[in-house]
């Protein structure tokens, strides 16, 4: 029901002029329909969606959708249902990005996928006024700014949009439909009253019709109210003079002239079902005193009592929003205890059928906090796995402070607050819980609670970096840890990232002695209590393992890899298995055992395919392509990378950074530096937005290498300085080392230039020291890299030119060179011309002699 248009009523008034306005707006980005309740916004959109014959993705919004993850999951599901199945499935796979990444990163991925579909598509957001979450507003605004031209957004709301749209109005990208356009014309009013009476006889004389229309000012709900009153036998004269400019009369008439005219059975049914957001026989039977509600729903349809169909089969309904609000107000005001009773019955029904979200909402509305909490505790892990943190926070915050929650449940509340990033509030809550825990007598319960507190505080440490507080808190009971809470210790922390250290658990690439110390303390205690196979323990170890690789502590990296591989969960938890095998492949490559590196990737790919977790295949292909590039197997690299479906024309998404970075390296090998740098320029702000250190260092390093390759020496060294600054703060080594001899030469150039300057500030000195440290790592890894490959040339040769020299020595023809380097023969001729110019020669033979005299080809 959430992602399909509502059904259409019988005898619907066809509003050609408005339908034409909606169709005319398709050329822009956005169409808004803004008016108070009762002006037919939803009916108009549904009519257009059914009659336009266009692809439409529909989302009906309500208060429960004020959760960014829930909201965007519904939007994605709606879009997916309107698109070809393969693309729709891909869109749904991307929801795993939330909430680990920012909404913007998720939207970047969503938008990137939508660009692949070129047919017109319309996304309809109904009742946006229900959404008051600022993060969702910002996400919608971001989506509008970057919408593909073939996608048009339509929004209905009772209030003005909560984000600026003036730019779109000026550029004629946005069309507004308001109250004046939505008001019924006299002709539409006449047709409406003609269809109201099944006999086809007019209910009003022409003069009365004109009066009703002018007094109602075309307000559709007012006209419908008048029609129901007339059907109940009341003449139009008593209310005609009062309708103009007095919306509050709606409640008066609903009560006096509509509801009060109904039979006692209908009246009771209306009141007893007022708490429901959807009506169908089963839920109505559970909530009301009626054994069979189907005849009552059919009677309400016949009476035209503000019942809105939710499906084409007319099996599901809801009350018109104004009517629903009137009934609720009446129920709460005049029928003591009925409001809570009906909400409680609804909660019990939804709990019985397993719809826990709806059950908890109704029980909280009934203020039956005990029943709500009894459902919330076991349901919490499921909602966490969906990533709907805002929904959990809303539920917890609706429980009044005076309700006697257990310390365990209070801690769960604090954990949710930590996940929202509210550090001040979560610290205050944690301190109170720690005091309550300290007051408990020594017992298993106290130790278990302390274990859970330690976990929550660990998450807080990951956010605020307060390692000292964590160590102080853990001292004294760390060895008595009893980590038995599955919510905290058996949670799958990684649904998409090829590297665990990129996740919040891995502190987004932050590495330090403190993080290593805490990881050892934490995992050591878990293992001493038999929790060495818990997901929490394995994820922390995998993050540490990746850190060891980055620090170039390869022996320790290997030891951790063996430990994690032997743990059963690593075999079927893709968030562990894939990063584990990628790290293993990179470790083998660092040891120059490329055949074993490919075998590690083969294992991972086989596991992914058998588990049908295809979303993990692209990063595995990207890493394989990277290995091929490092081996100089350009043709194989091109084939692997082509399967990633990435292009220089793309707007690359952060979630696919691994794939784009290997593609960028291939572009560099092909001498397409400008295109590679353009993609890096698009990726870098996303990495900075996510505060992803590993990405920032890698992207900036690649920028430096590519700028140097195209002769921009000054800019290259400046970028390298930025990369060294962030790298030094976290001890990054392999990110630089894995770029090979080109990076060594650039580091040497940087060191020589910086070493000649008279005075350096503290940051420049730190960068210089770190550059020299990295050069020592290069020398230890491969002493030959310490020898300059371009001794006395006025202008250094880039990688492609060095490869050309080697191919000249082998006697390769232009066509063979093109195949070996993955370039066209025309590009090869251009590169040869540049090479001859740098060497000061005009033939291949001269080039080979000159290269030998300069020891350029010395192995």
Image (spheres, rainbow, N blue to C red):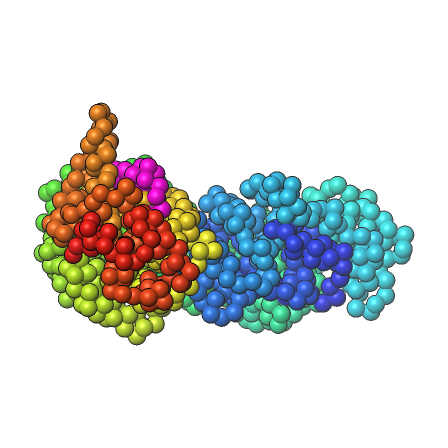
Q: Quadrant of the N terminus?
A: bottom right
280 is higher (above) or lower (below) than 68: below
Q: Quadrant of the C terminus?
A: bottom left
The magenta segment: 709-725
Residue 563 in picture, x, y percent from top left: 13, 62
Q: Seen in the image, is 734 located left or right of residue 73?
A: left
Residue 794 in picture, x, y percent from top left: 28, 41
List the single residue furthest toward the top: 759
Nearer-the-camera pick, 563 or 186 = 563
Residue at point 59%, 70% (across, down)? 315
Q: Seen in the image, is 672 located left or right of residue 429?
A: right
Residue 531 in view in this figure: no
Q: Is residue 413 magenta?
A: no
24 is higher (above) or lower (below) than 773: below
339 is higher (above) or lower (below) than 715: below
Q: Is residue 713 magenta?
A: yes
Nearer-the-camera pick, 62 or 522 = 522
Residue at point 27%, 65% (across, down)? 811
811 is higher (above) or lower (below) than 548: below
Nearer-the-camera pick, 156 or 319 = 156
Nearer-the-camera pick, 533 or 406 = 533
List the single residue furthest toward the bottom: 610
């Amino acid at each position: 029901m959430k992602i399909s248009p509502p059904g259409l009523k019988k005898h619907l008034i066809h509003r050609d002029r408005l339908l034409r306005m909606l169709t005319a707006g398709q050329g822009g980005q956005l169409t808004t329909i803004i008016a108070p309740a009762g002006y037919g916004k939803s009916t108009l959109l549904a009519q257009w969606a059914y009659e336009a014959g266009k692809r439409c993705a529909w989302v009906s919004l309500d208060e429960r959708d004020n959760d960014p993850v829930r909201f965007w999951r519904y939007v994605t599901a709606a879009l997916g249902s309107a698109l070809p199945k393969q693309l729709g499935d891909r869109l749904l796979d991307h929801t795993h990005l939330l909430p680990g990444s920012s909404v913007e990163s998720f939207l970047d991925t969503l938008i990137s996928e939508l660009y692949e579909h070129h047919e017109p598509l319309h996304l309809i957001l109904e009742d946006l006024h229900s959404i008051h979450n600022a993060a969702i507003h910002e996400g919608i605004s971001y989506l509008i700014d970057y919408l593909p031209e073939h996608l048009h957004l339509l929004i209905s709301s009772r209030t003005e949009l909560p984000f600026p749209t003036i730019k779109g109005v000026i550029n004629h990208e946005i069309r507004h439909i308001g109250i004046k356009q939505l008001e019924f014309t006299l002709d539409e009013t006449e047709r409406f009253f003609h269809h109201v009476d099944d006999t086809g006889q007019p209910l009003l004389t022409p003069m009365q019709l004109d009066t009703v229309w002018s007094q109602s000012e075309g307000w559709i709900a007012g006209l419908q109210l008048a029609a129901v009153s007339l059907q109940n036998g009341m003449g139009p004269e008593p209310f005609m003079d009062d309708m103009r400019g007095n919306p509050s009369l709606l409640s008066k008439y609903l009560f006096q002239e509509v509801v009060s005219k109904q039979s006692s059975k209908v009246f009771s049914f209306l009141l007893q079902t007022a708490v429901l957001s959807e009506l169908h026989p089963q839920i109505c039977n559970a909530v009301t005193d009626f054994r069979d509600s189907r005849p009552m729903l059919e009677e309400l349809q016949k009476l035209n009592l503000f019942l809105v169909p939710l499906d084409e089969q007319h099996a599901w309904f809801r009350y018109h929003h104004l009517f629903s609000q009137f009934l609720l107000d009446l129920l709460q005001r005049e029928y003591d205890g009925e409001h809570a009773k009906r909400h409680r019955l609804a909660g019990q029904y939804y709990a019985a059928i397993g719809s826990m979200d709806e059950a908890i909402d109704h029980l909280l509305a009934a203020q039956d906090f005990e029943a709500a909490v009894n459902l919330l505790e076991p349901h919490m892990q499921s909602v966490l796995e969906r990533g709907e943190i805002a929904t959990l926070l809303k539920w917890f915050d609706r429980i009044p402070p005076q309700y006697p929650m257990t310390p365990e449940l209070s801690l769960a509340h604090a954990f949710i607050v930590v996940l929202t990033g509210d550090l001040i509030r979560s610290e205050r809550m944690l301190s109170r819980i720690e005091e309550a825990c300290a007051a408990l007598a020594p017992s298993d319960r106290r130790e278990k609670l302390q274990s859970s507190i330690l976990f929550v505080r660990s998450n807080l440490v990951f956010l605020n970096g307060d390692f000292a507080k964590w160590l102080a808190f853990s001292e004294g009971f760390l060895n008595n840890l009893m980590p038995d809470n599955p919510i905290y210790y058996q949670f799958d922390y990684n649904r998409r990232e090829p590297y665990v250290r990129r996740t919040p658990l891995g502190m987004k690439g932050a590495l330090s002695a403190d993080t290593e110390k805490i990881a050892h303390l934490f995992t050591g205690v878990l293992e001493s209590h038999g929790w060495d196979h818990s997901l929490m323990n394995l994820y922390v170890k995998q993050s540490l393992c990746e850190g060891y690789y980055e620090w170039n502590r390869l022996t320790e990296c290997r030891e951790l890899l063996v430990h994690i591989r032997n743990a059963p969960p690593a075999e079927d938890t893709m968030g562990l298995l894939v990063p584990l095998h990628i790290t293993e492949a990179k470790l083998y490559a660092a040891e120059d055992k490329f055949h074993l590196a490919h075998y590690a990737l083969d294992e991972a790919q086989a596991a992914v395919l058998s588990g049908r977790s295809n979303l993990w295949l692209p990063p595995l292909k990207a890493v394989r392509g990277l290995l091929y590039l490092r081996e100089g197997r350009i043709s194989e690299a091109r084939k692997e990378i082509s399967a990633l479906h990435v292009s220089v024309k793309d707007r690359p998404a952060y979630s696919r950074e691994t794939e784009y970075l290997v593609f960028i390296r291939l572009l560099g090998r092909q001498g397409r530096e400008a295109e590679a740098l353009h993609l890096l320029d698009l990726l870098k702000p996303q990495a900075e937005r996510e505060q992803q250190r590993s990405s920032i260092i890698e992207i900036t390093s690649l920028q430096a290498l590519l700028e140097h390759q195209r002769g921009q020496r000054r800019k290259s060294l400046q970028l390298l300085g930025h990369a060294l600054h962030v790298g030094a703060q976290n001890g990054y080594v392999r990110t630089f080392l894995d770029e090979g001899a080109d990076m060594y030469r650039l580091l040497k150039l940087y060191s020589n230039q910086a070493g000649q300057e008279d005075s350096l500030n503290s940051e420049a000195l730190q960068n210089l020291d770190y550059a020299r440290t990295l050069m020592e790592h290069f020398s230890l890894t491969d002493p030959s890299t310490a020898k300059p490959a371009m001794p006395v040339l006025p202008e250094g040769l880039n990688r492609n030119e060095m490869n050309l020299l080697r191919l000249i020595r082998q006697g390769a023809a232009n066509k063979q060179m093109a195949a070996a380097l993955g370039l066209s023969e025309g590009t090869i001729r251009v590169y040869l011309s540049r090479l001859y110019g740098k060497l000061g020669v005009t033939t291949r033979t001269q080039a080979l002699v000159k290269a030998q005299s300069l020891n350029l080809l010395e192995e």
